[in-house]
Image (spheres, rainbow, N blue to C red):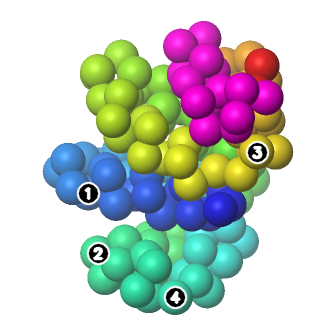
Amino acid sequence: MTCLHALAEMLRQLYAARQGRQADLLMDRCSSAALETLLGESSAFLGSRVNYAVTDRLRHRKPQLDETALPTIRAIASVLNAWLHDGRRSAIRAVLRELGDDELRELASLPELNDEVATMTGDFAGGNAP
């Protein structure tokens, strides 16, 4: 379980909900290196839609986006906050399930993360998350 697994799950959730624009924004917030590493995962893990979208986004990526790229965990946090506002708690849980204990603690400690999402991380970290 890694941050990349969570990113892949988040992209799958966004495309399943027909939120392609939000998926594009999420990929723009991530570094090219993170997206290339994600592509290095097996295509069965990513799924054909996510694999195609990431490949296409990298192909058309503007170089200046890497200058403003966020760490992957911060990019994920911004979508989790939006999902909480939209009432998509099951999608949040699906993404949190993909994170390891250290990543859950890091996510929960982000100041921009909504308190309710931070509390939800404890369900997946064995209660060790703040």
Q: Specify whether residue 4 is painted magenta.
A: no
Disc with the residue nearer the chain's start (2 vs 3): 2
47 or 56, which is in the foreground? 47
Disc with the residue nearer the chain's start (3 vs 1): 1
Q: Specify whether residue 125 is painted magenta.
A: yes
Q: Which residue is drawn at 31% across and 50% down?
A: 14
- Can you tell which of label 4 and label 2 is closer to the viewer? 4
Q: In which quarter of the image is the C terminus?
A: top right
Q: Which residue is drawn at 67% across and 77% down?
A: 37
Q: In the visual, does 95 lie left or right of 16?
A: right
5 or 30, which is in the foreground? 5
Q: Mark 1 points at which residue?
A: 15
Find out whether the residues at labels 2 and 1 contact each other: C-beta distance under 8 Å.
yes
41 or 55, which is in the foreground? 41
- Helix or strand or loop: what does disc 3 sit on? helix
Q: Name the residue under label 2.
A: 49
* Residue 78 x, y percent position in the rendering: 54, 32
Disc with the residue nearer the chain's start (2 vs 1): 1
- Helix or strand or loop: what does disc 2 sit on? helix
CA distance separating discs 4 and 3? 23 Å
Disc with the residue nearer the chain's start (1 vs 4): 1
- Can you tell which of label 4 and label 3 is closer to the viewer? 3
* Residue 85 x, y percent position in the rendering: 36, 17
Q: Mark 3 points at which residue?
A: 101
